[in-house]
Amino acid sequence: MLAILYENALTAQRSALNPLYESIKACSMSQSPTLNRRIILNARPQGAPTTSDFRIENGPVPVPEVGQVLLRTLYLSLDPYMRGRMSDGPSYAAPVAVGDVMVGATVSRVEASHNSGFTVGDLVLAYTGWQEYALSDGADLTKLAPAMAHPSYALGVLGMPGFTAYMGLLDIGAPKAGETVVVAAATGAVGSVVGQIAKLKGCRIVGIAGGADKCRSAVQDLGFDACVDHRSPNLAALLTAACPKGIDVYFESVGGKVFEAVLPLLNSAARVPVCGLIAHYNETTLPEGPDRSALLMGTLLTKRIRMQGFIIFDDYGPRFPEFVKDMSQWVKDGNIKTQEDFVDGLENAPLAFIGLLEGKNFGKLIVRVASD
Ligand SMILES: NC(=O)c1ccc[n+]([C@@H]2O[C@H](COP(=O)([O-])OP(=O)(O)OC[C@H]3O[C@@H](n4cnc5c(N)ncnc54)[C@H](OP(=O)(O)O)[C@@H]3O)[C@@H](O)[C@H]2O)c1
């Protein structure tokens, strides 16, 4: 059963009401680690991040106090939004301070517990960042079902990226059977799910991805009707040929020349969920060139196009259970397939993250920090 359990807040509250039990509960350790490796933000990147923007630090494994658990990171999610956290420009979220541990979602195992809501061996979804061990009071943890076949899915298809695909496509994109849906970064964590949900809704699905291998996989493995390579000099012509009836929904994750190829093909009343702009994340200033805003505004106006940005948990947080229910079923039934790109070892997280911003990942990028 892939469903994620939502009992953590209640159990944490119950444990807080039982200090006597807390004080006598033995803290049992499944092993006795001594070293906690952590990846620190060493400097704010200028343009594309480099390995010198990170440093690795060794510290002691923290010791849980009453009410706390010690977590060991099994899987660390690497996501494009982390590039934004490395900068201190205006954003919807606070930056990581230079000298702090890089932020990130993890699937972690409870190694020691002084919190009656958790027992040693529990698997949890946490937000403890790029480090091997961390403490938590339990309030920010979500327990995963013990029998969850693939705990790492909680970081991908059954987690934030899958939720982003689900809400952005269904709530803003509102695809109807027979329509053409185009999705950029088509084999990535979000894009691969967008395409497969749109297929379930009876749409024609066209992906845009970097390179022949990714395009082949989008069609053969994920069931896309077509996929075009954004590295091709003929991108606009290839996309036009793949969308003979124009584009009704464009799920935007990239921007730049990909959006330029999409814009002329948008149909009247098209919907454009703006999920991300990864082609621009390393830019420090707006791109130079002719002002194309009149073309964009004119197209939106005359074609009555709806273009809407969203930040997944800010805008849709309360709908997470609805997503988990649907997506768990789709995954279980084999209607949604997922590709995971595993990198072994915390020390390899910086290079893997740099690669994510260059399109080197093939599917949901996850660092395997320790074995489960
Ligand atoms: N709004 C939200 O709440 C929210 C939540 C989650 C994610 N997002 C956004 O969704 C997008 C996808 O995230 P993800 O986690 O699914 O990542 P992902 O697709 O697994 O990985 C990123 C992919 O972006 C593509 N890419 C990178 N640089 C590019 C460039 N210059 N031009 C074209 N494509 C480029 C690459 O794929 P190719 O090799 O195929 O080009 C790369 O593999 C990102 O923009 C992210 O910021 C937004």
Image (cartoon, rainbow, N blue to C red):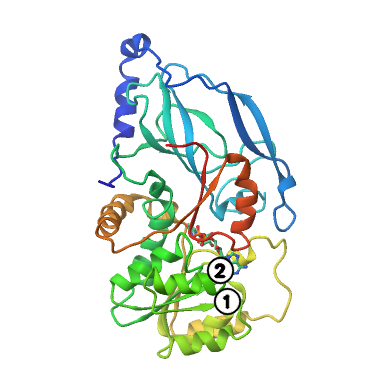
Which quadrant of the structure image shows residue 80? bottom right
Q: Are marks 2 and 1 in contact (CB under 8 Å)?
A: yes
Q: Position of residue 163 (x, y in %)?
A: 38, 56
Q: Amino acid at mark 2?
A: Val
Q: State yes or no: Cβ of the residue under disc 1 lies below 8 Å from any atom of ligand 1.
A: yes
Task: List x then y, in percent, for residue 356.
Answer: 59, 57
**Residue bearing mark 2:** 254
Q: CA distance from mark 2 to mark 1?
A: 10 Å
- Toward the viewer: 171 or 207? 207
Q: Quadrant of the C terminus?
A: top left
The secondary structure type at the circle numbered 2 is: loop
Disc 1 designates what residue?
A: 230
> Residue drawn at (45%, 86%), measured in percent from left and top?
242
Q: Who's the residue at 26% across and 57% down the image?
A: 326
Above or below for 302 versus 360? below
187 on left or right of 99: left
Is 114 or 306 nearer to us in this picture? 114
Q: Residue at x 52, y 39 (%)?
A: 369
In the depicted structure, whether residue 91 falls above or below residue 213: above
- Could you say whether the residue bearing mark 1 is in a helix, strand or loop? loop
Q: Is residue 277 above or below residue 26?
A: below
Up-down: is 255 above or below 107?
below
Q: Nearer the viewer, mark 2 or mark 1?
A: 1
Q: Is residue 95 visible?
A: no
* Residue 337 shows in this picture: yes
